[in-house]
Image: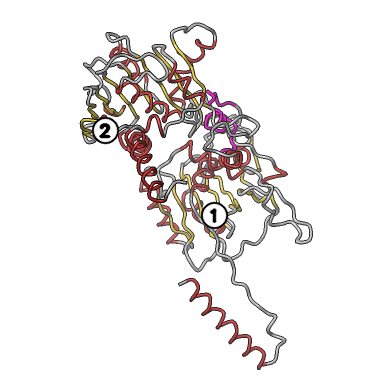
Amino acid sequence: MIQPANLQELERELDRRRREDPLSLQYHPIDKQIALHRSRKTLTIAVGGNRSGKSYAAVAETQYYCLGRPVWAELPDPPVMVWYVMPSLPMFRRAIRPIMMRLIPWNEVKRAYWRDGIIEYRNHSELHILSADMRQKRVQGASVDLAVLDETPQQDIFDEAQARIMDRHGRIVLAFAPIDVSVAWVRDGYYIPWTQGDKPGIDVVHFPTADRDGHSLVPWFSDQDIRDAEERWPDPATRASRLYGEFITRSGRVYTFAPETHLIPPFEVPDGYARWLLIDPQYHRFASLYFAADPTGTYYVTDEYFSQDESLAHRAERLAAIVGKKDRAVPAYVDSANPQDTAELNWHFQRIGASIAAIPLPFPKKIDAMVLRVHSMLEPNEQRVYRHSAADAPLYGAPRLLFFNTLCSTWSLPDGKDFVASRLLWEMQHLTWGKSGKPDKDTADGADCCDCLSYGCTIQHSGVAAPVVETWKDGLSLADRITWSVIERADSWDRRRRED
C-alpha cells in the first residue's frame, strides 16, 4: 500500500515531469492532429471549425521542430528556424501564447524574449513570433525550416514565407477556420485544385468540430455543447464554416423571414419595456425603425418610417407622432458619419418638443457580427412562448425578434413602381449575398431599413418586469396581516444572514 508521503512524492514527480516534458505527458493528439504531424508536404493546410484543435497541433509542430524530436515523422536536425505568424500580436497573446506556455518544455529553453517575439532553445533553434500587420518588415531576409500561418492567412505573407523556405526545403502550415472571405485565395488557388488532384505537393487535413448530425468530433466538447453552438450560429453558412470547417460561398437571401413565425398582432407596449429608435438619415432614403424589448430579452419592431422626398422637419414630426409623449426621451441612434445630421435632428426634435434624443451609434459597424446576431434572433426557439398566445393554450416556437403585422410605409422603386407596404419586410425578402461575401444592398434598393434592423438588434436593451402586486392578504383581518408582515420580515432577515 502506498503511504501518503510516498503518494505526495509521486504527485510532485508527475507534476515535475509534466512541466519538463509537456509534449509527452500533456499533449495527447487526436487523429486529425496526428495527420498534421505526419504530413511532410511543402504545404499543409489545416482547415477546420472553431476550437477543433488546429492551433494546438500547430504549436506542437513548432516544438517538435525546435527540439528536433521526430515523434511522428522525420525532422531536420537542429538548430532550426521556425516562424509562427498571427494576424496581430494581441490575437497571439490572447489565443496562442497560453498554448505555448503549456506545451513548451521550458528546461529546453535558453531564453524567451516575449517582447521581441523570439524564443531561443539550448540547441540553438529559434522560434520567431510574427504578426501579419508587420507586413514584410520582419518577414524578409531569413531562411526558415517551418512557417506556421495561423488564422486568416494573408496572401502576401504566404508568398513571402514561400520565398523564405526555399533554400532549406522547408514547410508551410496554414491553420485556419474558413469564416472570412479573405481566405478565398486559399480555396481557389490550392484547396479546389487539390480536390481535383492538381496539387500533389500539398496536404489538406480537415478539422471539423462536429458532424452535421450534431455529434461532437473532439473530446473536449459534448453533443450538448454542439447543440448550444448550433443555436448561436443558425445561419447555415456560418455553421458550416465554424463547426464543420467547410469552405463556403454565401448565396441566396441574407435573412430567413417567415410571416407565420415572425409577424404578430400589435399590442400596447407596457411602460416597463425598453424603447429606442434607429435612424438612417439619407435624404432620398430616410429610414427609421422603432424597437421595444421586454424583460425576457425579446425584441419587437413596432413601427417603421421610410421617406424619399419629405423635408427633415416633416420627418422629425412623423417620428415624434410615432413615439408620442414620454416622461423620458427615447434614444434615437443615428447611422451617420456626419455629426451635422445628428445635430439637425436634435434641433427639430427640440423645436417641436418631441420626446426623442438623437445620438450617434455607440459601437463600430461590424457587418458580419451584426448580421449573425439578427440571424440568431430570428431563429425559432421551441422553449419560448408567443406573447399573444392564450394563457391556457401557450404557443411555443417564438423567436427573439418579432415584427408587428401593421408595419407600413409608402415608397417607389427606381423603375417607378409604387408600394404601400412594409419597406423593412420587403427589403428582408429581397436582400441577397454578393460575390464579396457581404450583403449586396443593390438587390434591396439600398437596404436602408435592413441596416437599421442590424444596428437596432445590436443595441443591448432589456425591459423591466413590472412589480408583482400581492392581493391575497386583502381578505385577511388586520391582526393576520400584521402577523404575516412580521413573518415575512423575519424570513427576509434570515435569508440575508445565510447569504452573508
441 sits left or right of 384 in the view = left
Q: Is residue 16 above or below residue 316?
A: above
For this orientation, the residue located farthest to the right is 392
Q: Quadrant of residue 80?
A: top left
433 sits left or right of 100 in the view = right
- Residue 414 appears in the figure: no
What amino acid is labelled 2 in the image?
Asn
Q: Is residue 119 magenta?
A: no
| Residue 107, label in figure | 2
What amino acid is labelled 1 in the image?
Arg
The residue drawn where x is 37% and y is 35% is 99
The residue drawn where x is 54% and y is 8% is 196
Q: Earlier in the sequence, mark 2 or mark 1?
A: 2
Look at the image and give the residue range highlighted in magenta: 233-251
Q: How is the image coloured?
A: secondary structure
Q: Secondary structure at mark 1?
A: helix
194 sits left or right of 77 in the view = right
> How many labels sit on residues?
2
The residue drawn where x is 65% and y is 88% is 481
- Residue 207 appears in the figure: yes
Q: Which residue is mark 1?
A: 318
Depth order, front residue of 311/77: 77
Q: Is residue 235 magenta?
A: yes
